Image (cartoon, rainbow, N blue to C red):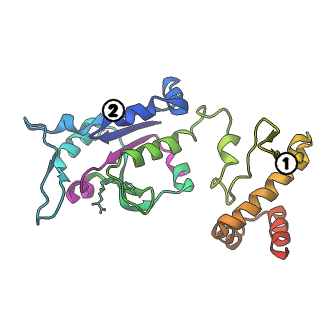
Amino acid sequence: MRIDIMTLFPEMCEAFLSESIIGRARAAGHVDIRCVNIRDYAGNKHNRVDDYPYGGGTGMVMKPNPIYDCYQAVTEGGARKCHLIYLTPQGKTLTQERVRELSEMDDLVFLCGHYEGVDERVIEEIVDEEISIGDYVLTGGELPALILADSISRMLPGVLANEDAFTEESHYGHLLEYPQYTRPAEWQGREVPEVLLSGDHGKVDRWRLEQAVARTLERRPDMLEAADAAGELTKEEREILDTLKDV
Ligand code: SAM
């Protein structure tokens, strides 16, 4: 998978993408992520990439041409077929399901806006999809693009130690994950649940499922309701849920 991030702040993105799991995944060739500076395509001697909004108002708007020329360079004049995502608070809110679907594509391009955003015409011309990371507004699209790159990359083969690392996690299915504990077995007078020290894998699995269902019911009942309506609850999950509701 190759991801090109079109941004005015490539160093900001590189700083994050060079560290930890994603940094190692890039170094090992599991994912090819490139940060491309839109300013390199400014096309004027002052390297100007933004301008005042037509109609007045505060802030600046990113000009269409540098973005378009940057996109042309990334796609080699259209020879590379890429799926271009504009990160914007006006987009569809990102979900784990969409992350999974995107992780099956080969060539993604992310466009990071800044200031008041980008000229609408370039969105109409080149953007395939608009994604928001939540109902709040940030100063730029770099953090959203990094969130998207991170969430997609960790689903690619070889990036995490094994697939369970993400298939068992919150939001992969319709449950939040069970609570996690590590050593020491007692900390500040708080003990790790005894079952986790029992070595009985069957009991541990059952306890984890009960915890996951209870936690989801408490924090995100909407997820359970949706799964129930879609007939996705397993027999075991339904039993646990019914018991919890009777209490
Ligand atoms: N004027 C725009 C509006 O009201 O919809 C907001 C522009 S915002 C200040 C600047 C840039 O940050 C956007 O172009 C977008 O790339 C990015 N951005 C801000 N919040 C975001 C969010 N919740 N999800 C994705 N991108 C976001």
Is 135 included in the stretch rendered in magenta? no
Whole-percent x, y for residue 115 in the image:
24, 52
The part of the image, by quadrant, that contains residue 210 is bottom right
Q: Kindly give the residue lying farthest to the left in the view shown.
A: 45
**Residue 241 drawn above or below residue 82:** below
Q: Amino acid at mark 2?
A: Glu
Residue 33 falls left or right of residue 217: left
Seen from the viewer's position, the closer of residues 89 and 138 is 138
Return the residue at label 1: 193
Looking at the image, in which quadrant does ligand 1 appear?
Answer: bottom left
> What residue is rendered at 70% in x and 62% in y?
216
Measured from the top left, where is residue 156 in percent x and y?
Answer: 56, 38
Rate crowding at label 1 as few (under 14), some (14 to 19) or many (20 or more) other CA atoms within 10 Å.
few
Q: Does the numbered disc 2 mark a residue whose Cβ is under 8 Å from ligand 1? A: no
The magenta stretch spans which residues? 101-125
The CB of the residue at mark 1 lies under 8 Å from ligand 1 = no
Indicate left or right for 231 with 103 as reference: right
Q: Which mark is residue 11?
A: 2
Of badges 1 and 2, the one in the foreground is: 1
Categorize mark 2 by other alpha carbons within 10 Å: few (<14), some (14-19), many (20+).
Answer: few
Per the image, label 2 sits on a secondary structure element best described as: helix
